Image (spheres, rainbow, N blue to C red):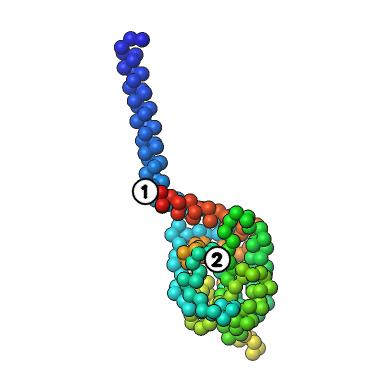
Amino acid sequence: MNRSVRVTLFALLLLVVLVFGGVVGRQVFLVDGGEPTPAPDLAEMNTYVYDQPRPLAEFTLTNENGETVTRESLRGRWTFAFVGYTNCPDICPAAMANLRRTDKLLSSELPQPDYLLVSADPEHDTPEQLKAYTGFFGENFHGLTGDLGTLRVLAKSLSAVFVHRQVDGELLVDHSGHFALVNPDGELAALIQPPHKPEQLAEAFERIYLWAKANRENARS
């Protein structure tokens, strides 16, 4: 092999090393110090995932056991939150039933979430009433009641609203129909709009959880 060929081969080898080193270096930079991976696109599941989760409003309310609950109480677990009321004739029972079916579809390898009914009718939704209602759906179903103004503020931070109106002397409550997924930091991570299909809810939760877990691990590395 003459000298010019050896020089050419050496130059090519050096170029390969430099390119490979640059790719590896860029990957390491992106993992160690780069931007988080963008949120998954789950539009086909009627789900919007926030790239940066939104903190919930501070609140002090009462759960179905008569215990005081604050925003800090939501830390440590994933939570599907839903604004509704126990006397709701149609939307709420169907929504809660879909959540119960979703709960049964979740892989045992995933963290098991809580399911939270935020009352839009605290006058009638006493802790005792909430306990009887949520207990029908499962042990990880819970309810919140308390001051009407505080409930409105919490609902707003879940991107939900509710309105009271009287019809023939009967109280009716119009309210949002979506589920809000709250992460273990007590932040709004995603909104899931109806129609709700348990199979899609379970898949959306798994994909959001895995995405959040990967970003958290990357941030630590």
For the point 59% across and 68% down, the residue is 115
Cα distance in 3D space between marks 1 and 2: 30 Å
Disc 2 target residue? 79
Would you call the spot at circle 2 few (<14 residues within 10 Å), some (14-19), or many (20 or more)?
many
Which residue is painted at 39% across and 51% down in the image? 35
Q: Secondary structure at mark 1?
A: helix
Residue extending farthest to the top is: 2
Secondary-structure class at tag 2: strand
Residue 165: % across, % down: 58, 84
Q: Amino acid at mark 2?
A: Thr
Q: Nearer the viewer, residue 165 or 218?
A: 218
Q: Quadrant of the N terminus?
A: top left
Location of residue 47 in the rendering, given as x and y in whole percent from the top left corner: 55, 59
* Residue 5 can be seen in this image: yes
Quadrant of the rendered image containing residue 124: bottom right
Q: Which mark is residue 33?
A: 1
State the residue at coordinates (59%, 61%): 112
Chain-order first, disc 1 or disc 2 = 1
Q: Position of residue 79 (x, y in %)?
A: 55, 66
The three-letter code of the residue at mark 1 reads Gly
Horizontal side, residue 13 vs residue 152: left or right: left
Classify 10 Å Cα crowding around label 1: few (below 14), some (14-19), many (20 and above): some
In the image, 205: left or right of 30? right
Residue shown at the point (48%, 51%) measured from the top left: 214
- Asked if residue 47 is positioned above or below residue 64 in the image, the reply reads above
